[in-house]
Every structure is written in structure tokens, then in C-alpha cells.
Image: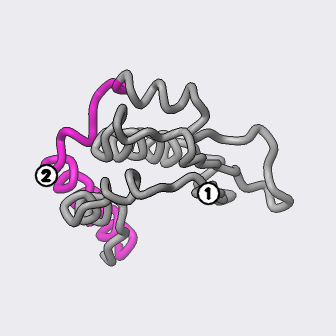
């Protein structure tokens, strides 16, 4: 019975987040995010780690904030996270995230305003049920 309550609470949290930030949950993948994926900003390796977990890579060098806003990047992250949550194998075995942030510059950091960070935390932070 407790698990059912937890699932219902998670569903309510997801609905609240969707209603609060509809611009971050598009029905289709926006063109700039598609371009980010084509450039190799994020992706999933075909190979797995020794424990069978999926390996996700992020390459921040490929993000130019002058072309693609932080809001659009967040939108792409939610789209990617949704796809991961639908992957039963990834949910069962787990996921490893590897990030390359070597190319981060001041123009990237300026995009991380307080409202942008609060939006990211509000969307991706797992709340206790």
C-alpha cells in the first residue's frame, strides 16, 4: 500500500512540474535541441559498464549559449530524462552519467541565473514522498 502512495505522489509531483514549466516539456523536440544532439552534446553509448548499466555522456563544449538558451538546454534534458525513464532496462540496471565540462567559459556560467537554477532543481530534484 505504501508503494502505491509513493507512485501517486511521484505522479502528482510530475504533473505539478509539467504545469509550472510547460515550456520545458515540449511535445516535440525543438530544432536547437536536435542540433545539440547532432553535435554530440549528449548521447548514450552502445557499450555498457561491467555491471550492465547504460552510460550517458554529456559534452558541454558543444553548447554555445549565444545560439541555444539555457531554457532550451533544460528542455532537451527533460526530453532525454523522459526517454530514460521509459527504458525498462535502464531503470532496472541503472545509469552512469559522464560529463565533459572542460570547455565551460564565463558565457556558459552567465546562463546559470538564479531562476534558471531554481527551474532545474524544481524539475529534476527528487522529492521525498
The reply to whether residue 8 is in sight is no
Relative to residue 55, is residue 114 depicted above or below?
below
- Dot 1, how many residues are within 10 Å of its Cα: few (below 14), some (14-19), or many (20+)? few
Quarter placement of the C terminus = bottom left
The residue where tag 1 is placed is: 102
Q: Residue at x 28, y 44 (%)?
A: 71
Name the spot of residue 94 as percent of width and height, x first: 65, 59
Instruction: State the residue in front, 15 or 61.
Output: 61
**Badge 2 or badge 1: first in the primary sequence:** 2
Residue extending furthest toward the right: 50
Instruction: State the residue in front, 67 or 17.
Output: 67
* Mark 2 element type: helix
Quarter placement of the N terminus = bottom left
Q: Is residue 12 left or right of residue 28?
A: left
The residue where tag 2 is placed is: 20
The reply to whether residue 57 is in sight is yes
Name the spot of residue 33 as percent of width and height, x first: 41, 31
Colouring used for the render: one colour
Name the spot of residue 97 as percent of width and height, x first: 62, 58
- Magenta stretch contains residue 11: yes
Main SS of residues in magenta: helix
Residue stretch in magenta: 1-30
* Mark 1 element type: loop
Amino acid at each position: 500500500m505504501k508503494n502505491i502512495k509513493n507512485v501517486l505522489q511521484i505522479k502528482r509531483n510530475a504533473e505539478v512540474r509539467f504545469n509550472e514549466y510547460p515550456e520545458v516539456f515540449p511535445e516535440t523536440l525543438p530544432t536547437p535541441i536536435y542540433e545539440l544532439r547532432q553535435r554530440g552534446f549528449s548521447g548514450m553509448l552502445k557499450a555498457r559498464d561491467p555491471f550492465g548499466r547504460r552510460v550517458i555522456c554529456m559534452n558541454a563544449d558543444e553548447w554555445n549559449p549565444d545560439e541555444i538558451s539555457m531554457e532550451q538546454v533544460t528542455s532537451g534534458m527533460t526530453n532525454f530524462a523522459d526517454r530514460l525513464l521509459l527504458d525498462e532496462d535502464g531503470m532496472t540496471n541503472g545509469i552512469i552519467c559522464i560529463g565533459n565540462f572542460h570547455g565551460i567559459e564565463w558565457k556558459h556560467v552567465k546562463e546559470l541565473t538564479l531562476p534558471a537554477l531554481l527551474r532545474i532543481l524544481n524539475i529534476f530534484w527528487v522529492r521525498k514522498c
